[in-house]
Amino acid sequence: MFTEKSSNLMGTVIRCGVAHPQHEALLDEAFNRLREYEHIFSANDPSSHLMQINRQAGRQAVKVPQDLFDLIKIGKRESLKAEGLLNIAIGPLIKLWHVGFKDAQQPSQDSINRTLPFVDPNNIILDEEQQTIFLKEKGMEIDLGALAKGYFADQIMAYFKSEQASAGFIDLGGNVLTFGKSPRETSDAWHIGIQNPALPRGNNVLVLKINDLSVVTSGIYERNLKRDGHIFHHIFDSKTGYPVVNDLASLTIISKQSLDGEIWTTQLFGKPAATIIKQVNQIEGIEAIVITKDNQMAASQNAMKNQLP
């Protein structure tokens, strides 16, 4: 039997479904795990394990749970790639602007200049043997918002599969992961809508039909700050201290693992739409759909298929 459940977590509505004889027990456990993940990984909860690392910046290393250590390790590796936009050390810049929150502001250039020295991922020190994280400079903060939901989705699907569920999905708001056959009588594929950036939420520009895939969308159309005729969104270039400037309204990555989708949406978002499609066509295991600010859409070679090659 297939059953769905939803809950308000991580600043969004999370929906989860599973096909299993003990579906209620699996869903309860899934949401218990998500609440625990939130407590470990949150950059907005002062009591989280992540915030313990940030509070000890420049002072001492902090021993952390294995899940958190593993994701920070992946995040640092990706943050050190020269051409990408991903930077898990970007916490001070996120807090300076606070786009998407009531106290959002356009900071002064002096404030930005003072903040930039604290967003260097080279200064995240990992000790594999002790399982500790140390931020070298006081004022540094790790923010895993660009990765965490993908990691959570993969972990929940792995749990469902370990319990021999026959199908399942999780939707963390802009991040969807599926496996098995959809419970719809009309189709075995899962139908995943891609938001039209120019219209209110719920208006799709297209609907993908997928199986055993992740769909991750990152866009500038919901969280933004309007000041003096300018619109500043929440996707930052840690080299300049400002939101990235290009022709993109949204970028969707289709992949087998949700964490890969999170990584690539962030790494690629700083590039022009045409460059993204050209690059993705050369990367095995992912597909992309881009929508520009003037509402033009383009897709990589296999993006509209319901399986990756």
Image (cartoon, rainbow, N blue to C red):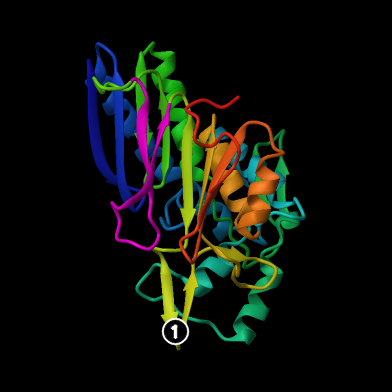
Three-letter residue code for mark 1: Arg
Characterize the local packing of mark 1: few (<14), some (14-19) or many (20 or more) Cα atoms within 10 angstroms: few
Q: Is residue 86 visible?
A: no
Q: Residue 108 lies in magenta, yes or no?
A: no
Picture quadrant of residue 237: bottom right
Residue 62's spot in the image, x, y percent? 61, 47
Q: Quadrant of the N terminus?
A: top left
Q: Is residue 52 visible?
A: yes
Q: Could you tell me which residue is drawn at 44 percent across and 14 percent down?
A: 162
Q: Is residue 4 left or right of residue 216?
A: left
Which residue is the site of mark 1?
227
Residue 265's spot in the image, x, y percent? 57, 49
Residue 242's spot in the image, x, y percent? 60, 73
Residue 146's spot in the image, x, y percent? 53, 51
Picture quadrant of residue 226: bottom left
Q: Could you tell me which residue is drawn at 39 percent across and 18 percent down?
A: 180
Closer to us: 25 or 218: 218
Q: Secondary structure at mark 1?
A: strand
Q: Could you tell me which residue is drawn at 27 percent across and 27 percent down?
A: 28
Q: Which residues are magenta?
A: 188-210
